[in-house]
Amino acid sequence: MNMTTTKKLTVVTPASWIPGPEQGRWTYADYTTIVEDGHYEVVDGVLYLSPAPSWDHQSIILEIVIHLHRWVQIRGLGRVCMAPLDIELSYANIVQPDVFIVLNKHLDRITSSHVIGTPDLVIEVASPATTRHDFREKQRAYACAGVPEYWIVNPNAHTVELLLLEGNSYRSPGLFFGDAVLPSIVIPGIPVQAGQFFATV
């Protein structure tokens, strides 16, 4: 299979046609040699390519960043970042969460080129093309890396699911929607309602 554009994709796909090591053996060093355009990530050493995001997807990301920036970055608690920015969770896991937070105590993990280590909170805006990947491969990678909190935002249902790390896996306290305030453990007391993320869609 030869594919050079995300326009042909309908779901997250292993990018086996990209020159490099065999699948399962990709590292950050290999990842940085990719010359083709696209949203690439490495999970468990497998190189994946995601379809281009939709307008609604990007609008929701912007709303999330606006609200979190107000309550995290402006208040001096840490940094709010958004894709495309690489996170090297480990030598075989290089991801680009839609949005993520690095608290002040971990700012040394942010380098001039990418983040090395575990962010404090990651957020993925799911879509029909990415939902399975977000709930399986990426969720497993985040848990193994020790990401304490993971939000999955569903644009169709207008819900946010919080996943809290307990041991080696995530526990979900439930789905939040409308005026329900998100009960974050990473940024406790943040007065952000789930419905605010969908104001423009």
Image: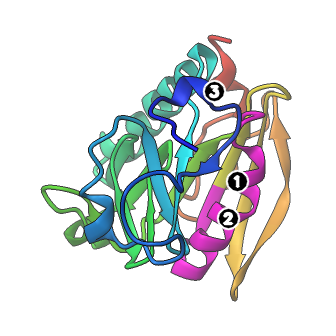
Q: Residue at x 39, y 37 (%)?
A: 69
Residue located beneath label 3 in the image: 197
Q: Which is nearer the eye, 4 or 107?
A: 4
Q: Residue at x 52, y 23 (%)?
A: 58
Using the numbered discs, state the Cα–Cα distance from disc 1 to disc 3 in whole angstroms: 22 Å
- On residue 137, the disc is 2
Return the residue found at the far top.
Answer: 200
- In percent of width and height, residue 99 lies at 48, 44
Q: Earlier in the sequence, mark 1 or mark 3?
A: 1
| Amino acid type indicated by mark 2 | Glu
Q: Nearer the viewer, mark 3 or mark 2?
A: 2
Compared with 200, 168 (above or below) is below
Q: Quadrant of residue 181?
A: top right
- In percent of width and height, residue 26 lies at 42, 71
At mark 1, the secondary structure is helix
Question: What segment is highlighted magenta in the picture?
Answer: 127-150
- In percent of width and height, residue 196 lies at 65, 24
Mark 3 Cα-neighbour bin, 10 Å: few <14, some 14–19, many ≥20: many
Any magenta on residue 79? no
